[in-house]
Image: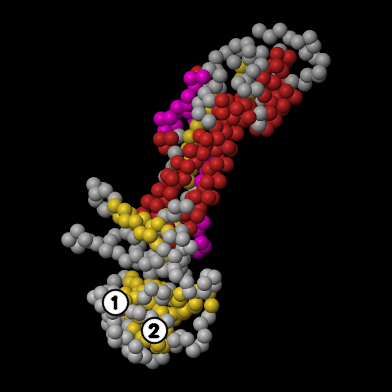
Amino acid sequence: MNELGDLVPGIAQENGRAAILFSALEDVPDTTTRIVVRVFASDATIAPSDLTLNLVPQIVPYVAVTMDPERIGVGDTASINVKRMNESGVLEDYPQDQLFDVAIRSGERYGVLLSGTQTADRFYEISEGFKFIAADSIDTNVAGAIITVRLPGLPTHPVSNGETDKKAGKKGESTMSPFYFDNGGVGKVVVVNGECEGLPTCIATPQPPHIEIQTHGNGFAGTFLDCSDPRTLGEFMIVDNRRTEPFTVDPCFDAGSGRWNFLVSTIDVNAIIDFCEVNRGNLRFLETTDEAALISDKCCAQIDFRGHNEYPIGGTGRPTAYRIVPAIFGHELQHEFDYQEILLKLKSELFDPEFQKSYMHPTCQTNPTAESAQAYAELLIKAILERLMEKVTNEWNLKVGSEGSEKRELYEKKTQGSLMVTAIVQDFLEALHLSETDCIPPPVCQ
């Protein structure tokens, strides 16, 4: 399944060049995983560009590294915890006498390693209990350091000059040249320059917004029902040129996670349910059962009422036949319920999980004000909503079939036979107060 990752906005360029560091630090894939990094320019005339990376499975056994905590302030300390990931993918403790080689692979200027009472950017053959101490000040709002841990005695690969480091070996010795290795482990710690202060805080954790259908009359937003079929007395349709209404986003900051959350208002999906006035003709429309009780030609009305259990509506066939307004609307309301069922199902499968992902909840370092966080969220929610509505439209069309198709005819017949229609028809039949023999012989209805 395709998943959208974190958005990294506002990367500065110098002389037409910019760079980011991509690190695979979290879940280790079981198979080779394809990752596509898409780069957008603020200039809309510059087309996006994609870079494809292949993330291969980690060789086991290996050193699994975690930082506690993963996010610290300047001058703070994070513990570097290590476990052994065995051949079965299970984490195990190392023996107490196990030694490790540890180094800051990148971000050396943002902190140092601590082993016992010694600090350095690199240690060899040291026991567990080592830590990372953030620098007292950093030159940016947020910075990151990558820590590399391996078992001693393995080859060292320098990052910068391409030459093997042959001086490695003394316990506690450190140098300034970073290194990496094939079967070690890495951890990442984020250093923030001060806390996010003065931001609106969250009283409770906001949940994904509700999405509801809002119905309108014919002609809403310049959209009109297709009443070309004279049998059509009512219709339900989604307003394609204005499928959703604007929504509001109220940002609040969660100090516990260090990220923005968003309270989003209910999102309305626009639809039209209305009569086809051009097809009314001389038909007699009944709004209530009280009107049915006052009919004089009740036997003919009974035939017309029973015709509402068919699709298209049957009955006497006379130009002045009776039509039950609530039954006509009941048919269209059943369409609305069917559409809503698809909408809510896909919302729970697609929209809600996407809303909870980390990229939807930026940090205060990337979005330092409520206004910037709000604009960020509005942009992403609109994009997710658009993808959701496209999928809903496709599934709806698959359910009802194309206009004039056998599938559409069967769907309309099933709708006409739904309880939403038949229960109303039965109420109107009972309002006639006819016995089984009142209409024998059958009436002539003109």
Q: Nearer the viewer, mark 1 or mark 2?
A: 2
| Left or right of residue 433: residue 241 | left
Point 53% across, 27% down: residue:
235
Residue 198 figure quarter: bottom left
Residue 331 figure quarter: top right
> Where residue 262 sits in the image (x, y, percent)?
45, 57
Say which label, 1 or 2, has the lower sequence index.
2
Which residues lie in the magenta part? Answer: 202-229
Local secondary structure at mark 2 = loop
Residue 268 among those drawn in magenta: no
Name the residue carrying label 1. Answer: 158
Point 35% across, 79% down: residue:
155
Q: Is residue 326 visible?
A: no
> Where residue 416 sits in the image (x, y, percent)?
63, 27
Whether residue 246 is situated above or below residue 241 in the rendered picture? below
Local secondary structure at mark 1 = strand
Front residue of this view, candidates 387 and 340 = 387
> Where residue 71 sits in the image (x, y, percent)?
41, 73
**Number of marks:** 2
Point 49% across, 89% down: residue:
97
Front residue of this view, candidates 201 and 234 = 234
Q: CA distance from mark 1 to mark 2?
A: 15 Å
Q: Badge 2 local density, few (<14 within 10 Å), some, or many (20+)?
A: few
Residue 210 among those drawn in magenta: yes
Name the residue carrying label 2. Answer: 153
Q: Is residue 90 visible?
A: yes
